Image (spheres, rainbow, N blue to C red):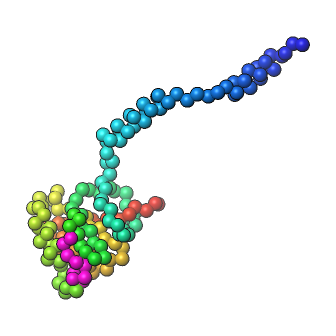
């Protein structure tokens, strides 16, 4: 009995599906090696702020990446400049003055701000920090000739 052309074609098609598939790993390893070298040579272009534990930043829909600046971190216990403790929060809240002299002298001693290029600073503060404390921190920055003050926030999805 003669098999039709269609039956032969279907038989070949079904035999193709039964073949064992082999994966050649050499090109795959080469691709991953190139990818690893690329990621090592080209670091992330975004600016990463230091992550403080137990610090809940406010959320925002801002799309502009932050610049590399001095960072003031305000925790529930201390005010930190670049990770170094400057003043305790309890003492600052108890003081009646409108700025923090210890922070102002630390900022003035950190470096001479050069016109507008160097007069930028970023404040990282917990969302539960009282506004009067944040106002004192900003006033101290302003008196130390840091005029461009940015507040660090967590970017939320739109």
Residue 10 percent location from the top left of the image: 77, 23
- Residue at the spot x=19%, y=85% of the render? 95
- Residue at the spot x=27%, y=68% of the render? 73
Residue 52 percent location from the top left of the image: 32, 65
- Residue at the spot x=11%, y=61% of the render? 111
Name the residue nearer the viewer: 148 or 24.
24
Name the residue nearer the viewer: 87 or 150.
87
Q: Is residue 13 above or below residue 136?
A: above
Picture quadrant of residue 32: top left
Q: How many marks?
A: 0
Picture quadrant of residue 66: bottom left
Q: Is residue 77 above or below residue 3?
A: below
Q: Is residue 40 above or below residue 145?
A: above
Q: Is residue 17 visible?
A: yes
Q: Give the magenta range.
A: 85-93
Quick one: quadrant of the N terminus? top right
Q: Is residue 139 visible?
A: no
- Residue at the spot x=64%, y=27% of the render? 20
Locate residue 29 relative to residue 134 in the image: left or right: right
- Membership of 27 in magenta stretch: no
Picture quadrant of residue 146: bottom left
For this orientation, the residue located farthest to the top is 2
Residue 100 percent location from the top left of the image: 17, 77
Residue 145 percent location from the top left of the image: 14, 67
Locate residue 32 relative to residue 71 in the image: left or right: right
For this orientation, the residue located farthest to the right is 1
Q: Is residue 136 above or below residue 5?
A: below
- Membership of 88 in magenta stretch: yes
């Amino acid at each position: 009995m003669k098999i039709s052309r269609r039956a032969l074609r279907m038989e070949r098609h079904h035999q193709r599906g039964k073949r064992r598939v082999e994966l050649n790993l050499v090109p795959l390893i080469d691709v991953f090696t190139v990818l690893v070298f690329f990621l090592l040579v080209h670091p992330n272009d975004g600016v990463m702020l230091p992550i403080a534990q137990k610090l809940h930043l406010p959320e925002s829909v801002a799309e502009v990446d932050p610049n590399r600046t001095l960072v003031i971190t305000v925790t529930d216990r201390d005010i930190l400049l670049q990770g170094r403790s400057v003043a305790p929060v309890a003492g600052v809240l108890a003081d009646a003055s409108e700025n923090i002299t210890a922070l102002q002298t630390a900022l003035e001693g950190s470096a001479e701000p050069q016109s507008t290029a160097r007069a930028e600073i970023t404040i990282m503060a917990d969302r539960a920090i009282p506004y009067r404390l944040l106002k004192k921190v900003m006033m101290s920055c302003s008196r130390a000739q840091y005029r461009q003050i940015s507040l660090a926030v967590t970017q939320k999805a739109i």
